[in-house]
Image (cartoon, rainbow, N blue to C red):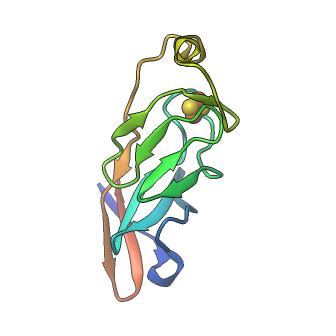
Amino acid sequence: MQLIEIARSEDVKEDKALAVKAGNTPLLLTRVGGKACAVSSKCPHLGLPLGKGKIANGTITCPFHGSSFDMCTGDNKDWCNAVVGMPIPGWTSRLLSMGKKPQSLPTYETTEENGKVFVRVPG
Ligand code: FES
């Protein structure tokens, strides 16, 4: 595992997504209850970018099909319930998911020291 500096602490804000790269790995950073949290920037549904997703109370919602994830644990909270922000009936959710079962969002361990945020990535 490598420890890589990815941001200044002051740039990581509560309920705001900050797009960063740890080597070749694109991540999203936010702050939840004061703690910096890092997740994959690709939605586990179809691999589309989560960067434009809204974050509220530490949960990010994918802007494409509405899946939502805890920004610190990666836990899936909702799966394929909308199309570009428009809610869809429950029975269409199965079609929209295209056979993919709900998955968690990969998370990355962070630490902060001397006003900098570091993340651990494989390598
Ligand atoms: S790509 Fe994110 S929910 Fe479909």
Snapshot quadrant of residue 4 = bottom left
In this view, the residue in front, 17 or 108, is 17
Task: Give the vertical position of 102 relative to 111 (above or below).
Answer: above
**Residue lying farthest front?**
89
Position of the N terminus by quadrant: bottom left
Q: Residue at x 40, y 74 (%)?
A: 117
**Residue lying farthest bottom?**
114
The mark tally for this picture is: 0
Give the x, y percent position of residue 115: 40, 87
Give the x, y percent position of residue 50: 59, 46
In this view, the residue in front, 10 or 68, is 68
Q: Quick check: 73 left or right of 80?
A: left
Q: In this view of the protein, can residue 123 be seen by the observer?
A: no
Task: Give the vertical position of 106 relative to 45 (above or below).
Answer: below
Give the x, y percent position of residue 21: 54, 59
Q: Residue at x 48, y 32 (%)?
A: 44
Q: Residue at x 61, y 30 (%)?
A: 82
Q: In this view of the protein, can residue 83 be seen by the observer?
A: yes
Q: Residue at x 61, y 52 (%)?
A: 51
Query: Quarter containing ligand 1?
Result: top right
Task: Give the vertical position of 117 relative to 103 (above or below).
Answer: below
